[in-house]
Amino acid sequence: MLPRGEVGLIFANIGRALRVVSDKLFSAVVLMVVVTTLVTPPLLRLLMKREEPRAENAPA
């Protein structure tokens, strides 16, 4: 998990314990943390593949 996601889960859990966050909202936060944690690495890999090394540093 990303630290950002873990912090979101901690705040959502505290809010739920204080009855500031509803169960519905808590579920949405947990779902978003899980989805963004799983989707981010493949998307970053895909974006990084598109960048090709420049020819300036290639040996002659």
Image (tube, rainbow, N blue to C red):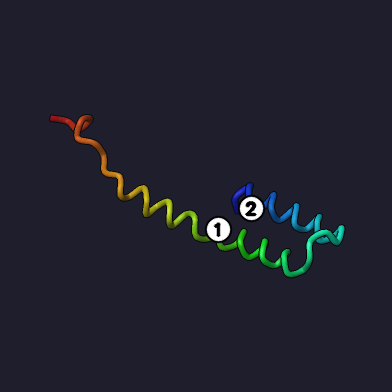
- Residue under the image location 32 percent in, 50 percent down: 49
Q: Position of residue 56 (x, y in %)?
A: 20, 30
Q: Label 2 neighbourhood size at 10 Å, few (<14), some (14-19), many (20+)?
A: some
**Quarter placement of the N terminus:** bottom right
Q: Label 1 neighbourhood size at 10 Å, few (<14), some (14-19), many (20+)?
A: few
**Quarter placement of the C terminus:** top left
Q: Secondary structure at mark 2?
A: helix
Q: Which residue is mark 1?
A: 36
- Taking the image as shown, residue 31 lies to the left or right of residue 13, namely left
Q: Is residue 10 above or below residue 29?
A: above
- Residue under the image location 63 percent in, 48 percent down: 4
Q: Position of residue 57 (x, y in %)?
A: 23, 30
Q: Secondary structure at mark 1?
A: helix
> Extreme left residue here?
60
- Taking the image as shown, residue 36 lies to the left or right of residue 5, namely left
**Which residue is nearer to you in this view: 57 or 24?**
24
Q: Is residue 30 above or below residue 58?
A: below
What kind of residue is marked 1? Thr
> Extreme right residue here?
18
- Residue under the image location 75 percent in, 57 percent down: 12
Per the model, the C-alpha gap separating discs 2 and 1 is: 8 Å
- Residue under the image location 60 percent in, 62 percent down: 34
Q: Position of residue 14 (x, y in %)?
A: 81, 55
Residue 43 lies in quadrant: bottom left
- Taking the image as shown, residue 3 lies to the left or right of residue 46, namely right
Q: Earlier in the sequence, mark 2 or mark 1?
A: 2
Q: Is residue 38 above or below residue 55?
A: below
- Taking the image as shown, residue 2 lies to the left or right of residue 50, namely right
Count of marks, rendered view:
2
CB within 8 Å, label 2 to label 1: yes
What kind of residue is marked 2? Gly
Q: Which residue is mark 2?
A: 5
